């Protein structure tokens, strides 16, 4: 039966299956994968039906993810060849890179090792070795993992709902990256390895950087946060999906939930103590973080924490300082860019905050989103011992509060920072955690479909890279809003929404990726989740709803 294939603005007719790779010139390794009728496919995929094909480069986020997964495979293969006695784990880290952690004790990591790994990787790339995909039963996979002593892969296997397992073979080296792969090692020429004690950083091309490797930008505060997160996760057995599942099954849902919440409670106590001991100077408490970090619930809980110490903070909404809709800056698509700091009346905000701190009575504005403009709001006067809490994506930006001396500001950065792996070679994306939160919340409170949320996510991410991430290193305190039990709880809310996305939708590849990650978690009920938990901001039932 004949079928038509459309690609590169031309349509051709075929009678037999055609491999995507065969539609490209033999030496063209610019293209990483393709969307076939909106489904992301490997280049080794064979088309046998009418199809619209879009070949993707690392300038596309779907292709970047495949490139990065394939690169992890390559580096793991290099370690297997050069240092078979070493056990490594990949996790996401500073400067949009992957950190190679050594699980063995007393490993000497130096530039000589980095050079050796780089040289061997480049040799394998030059050989252009194919990645051969094959399928085995779960029982066969278990035997392979046992034989190779891959305990981490063996542990996750029982939670795989399918009866089969995909593996990739490259010159006898077997691995599975929970992802599509490039056809061969020759596609992976662009990478950088950097010594970053006590491990190594792996940098790779990023879609948001136009398909190039971004310049290295160290972030010691963020790095320390991730280190603390990992230490806590290992201590509680929550550093892997299988570990989280086992904690829930062995310790019970209530105990595991309370352990996670206790960690948040401890952080609130520590933060409250810090502000209390510095309260004579602190007049402005600034809270910022990327989308779906839990900023609103956090601000409410911090306020309660301070009240318990005799401090009576006042909250002011930055959203009330939006410029009239017709004056808002436009984004690259010509739409109002509400993520931009230029969408705010910076001068008015600065002046109002300064006047309040000076003890003056101030008529605050209120932004009426229906009218698209500001109207008069409450009249406010604060006492000398009352700090002002502001919360929003620009709260740490000095331009917003440049009239206030730095010593009078206490800056807090909040984001969910997880160090959870499916297995040692497959970390879970920090960004995907927030996207899941946003999908669940937008449907619950804004009646928005998962497709709508996924559709706007690239714009949200552009705003975060432009306005938020650079400010975290100026923070006085970093609050990790991740709760290790949240994905088992979120699963029952997110899966139905993601499953509604049609396979023909342009957003299906993202939905498919999120489903592929969620399915490994066991279900956990939410009846015991406290009403003041940060996760309630997304699943509902928060005691702060409407505040």
Image (spheres, helix red, strand yellow):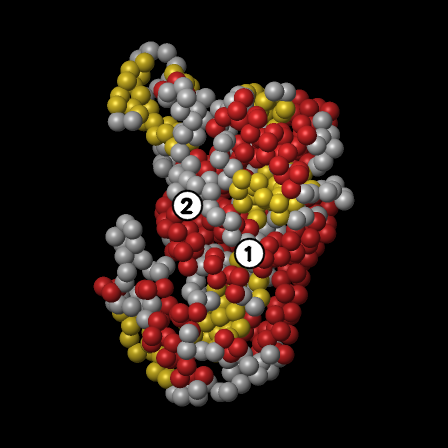
SS under mark 2: helix
Q: Nearer the viewer, residue 177 or 442?
A: 177
Residue 139 percent location from the top left of the image? 67, 24
| Residue that sits furthest to the right in the current view | 106
**x 57%, y 63%: residue:** 478
Of the 4 image quadrants, the one containing the N terminus is: top left
Q: Looking at the picture, does residue 60 appear above or below residue 547?
A: above
In the figure, is residue 239 to the left or right of 55? right
Q: Nearer the viewer, residue 238 or 475?
A: 475
* Number of numbered discs on residues: 2
Residue with the mark numbered 2: 209
Q: Nearer the viewer, residue 18 or 311?
A: 18
Q: Looking at the picture, does residue 371 appear above or below residue 453?
A: below
Which of pointers 1 and 2 lies earlier in the amino acid sequence? 2
* Mark 2 closeness class: few <14, some 14–19, many ≥20 residues within 10 Å: few
> Residue 219's mark?
1
Residue 131 percent location from the top left of the image? 54, 23
**x 49%, y 70%: residue:** 286
Of the 4 image quadrants, the one containing the C terminus is: bottom left
In the figure, is residue 540 to the left or right of 457? right
Residue 43 percent location from the top left of the image? 43, 24
Q: Nearer the viewer, residue 138 or 25?
A: 25
**Residue 18 at least partly seen:** yes
Quadrant for residue 124, please give it: top right
**Residue 157 at least partly seen:** no
């Amino acid at each position: 039966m004949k079928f038509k294939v459309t690609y590169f603005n031309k349509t051709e007719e075929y009678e037999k299956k055609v491999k995507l790779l065969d539609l490209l010139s033999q030496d063209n390794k610019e293209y990483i994968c393709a969307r076939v009728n909106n489904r992301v496919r490997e280049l080794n995929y064979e088309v046998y039906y009418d199809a619209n094909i879009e070949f993707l480069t690392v300038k596309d986020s779907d292709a970047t993810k495949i490139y990065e997964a394939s690169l992890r495979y390559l580096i793991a293969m290099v370690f297997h060849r050069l240092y078979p006695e070493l056990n490594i784990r990949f996790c996401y880290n500073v400067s949009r890179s992957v950190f190679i952690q050594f699980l063995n004790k007393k490993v000497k990591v130096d530039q000589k090792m980095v050079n050796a790994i780089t040289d061997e990787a480049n040799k394998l790339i030059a050989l252009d070795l194919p990645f051969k995909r094959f399928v085995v039963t779960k029982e066969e996979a278990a035997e392979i993992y046992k034989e190779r002593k891959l305990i981490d892969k063996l542990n996750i296997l029982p939670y795989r709902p399918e009866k089969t397992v995909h593996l990739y073979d490259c010159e006898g080296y077997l691995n599975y990256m929970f992802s599509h792969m490039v056809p061969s090692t020759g596609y992976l020429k662009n990478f950088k390895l950097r010594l970053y004690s006590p491990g190594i950083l792996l940098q790779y091309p990023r879609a948001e950087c136009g398909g190039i490797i971004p310049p290295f930008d160290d972030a010691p505060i963020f790095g320390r946060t991730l280190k603390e997160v990992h230490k806590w996760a290992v201590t509680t057995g929550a550093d892997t999906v299988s570990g989280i599942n086992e904690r829930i099954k062995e310790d019970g849902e209530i105990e595991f939930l309370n352990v996670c919440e206790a960690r948040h409670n401890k952080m609130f106590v520590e933060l409250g103590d810090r502000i209390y001991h510095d309260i004579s100077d602190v007049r402005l408490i600034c809270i910022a973080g990327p989308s779906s970090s839990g900023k609103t619930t956090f601000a409410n809980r911090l306020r309660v924490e301070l009240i318990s110490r005799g401090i009576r903070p006042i909250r002011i909404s930055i959203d009330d300082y939006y410029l009239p809709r017709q004056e808002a800056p436009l984004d690259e698509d010509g739409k109002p860019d509400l993520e931009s700091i230029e969408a705010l009346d910076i001068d008015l905000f600065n002046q109002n905050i300064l006047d309040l701190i000076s003890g003056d009575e101030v008529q605050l504005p209120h932004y009426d989103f229906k009218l698209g403009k500001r109207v008069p709001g409450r009249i406010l006067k604060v006492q000398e011992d009352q700090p002002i809490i502001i919360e929003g994506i620009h709260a740490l930006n000095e331009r917003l509060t440049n009239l206030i001396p730095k010593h009078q500001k206490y800056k807090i950065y909040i984001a969910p920072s997880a160090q959870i792996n499916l297995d040692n070679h497959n970390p879970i994306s920090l960004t995907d955690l927030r996207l899941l939160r946003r999908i669940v919340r937008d449907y619950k409170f804004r009646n928005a479909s998962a497709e709508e949320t996924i559709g706007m996510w690239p714009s949200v991410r552009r705003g975060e890279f432009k306005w938020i991430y650079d400010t975290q290193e100026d923070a006085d305190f970093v609050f990790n809003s991740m709760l290790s039990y949240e994905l088992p709880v979120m699963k029952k809310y997110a899966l139905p929404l993601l499953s509604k996305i049609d396979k023909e939708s342009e957003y299906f590849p993202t939905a498919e990726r999120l489903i592929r990650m969620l399915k490994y978690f066991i279900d956990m009920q939410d009846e015991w989740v406290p009403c003041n938990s940060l996760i309630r901001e997304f699943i509902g039932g928060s005691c702060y709803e409407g505040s």
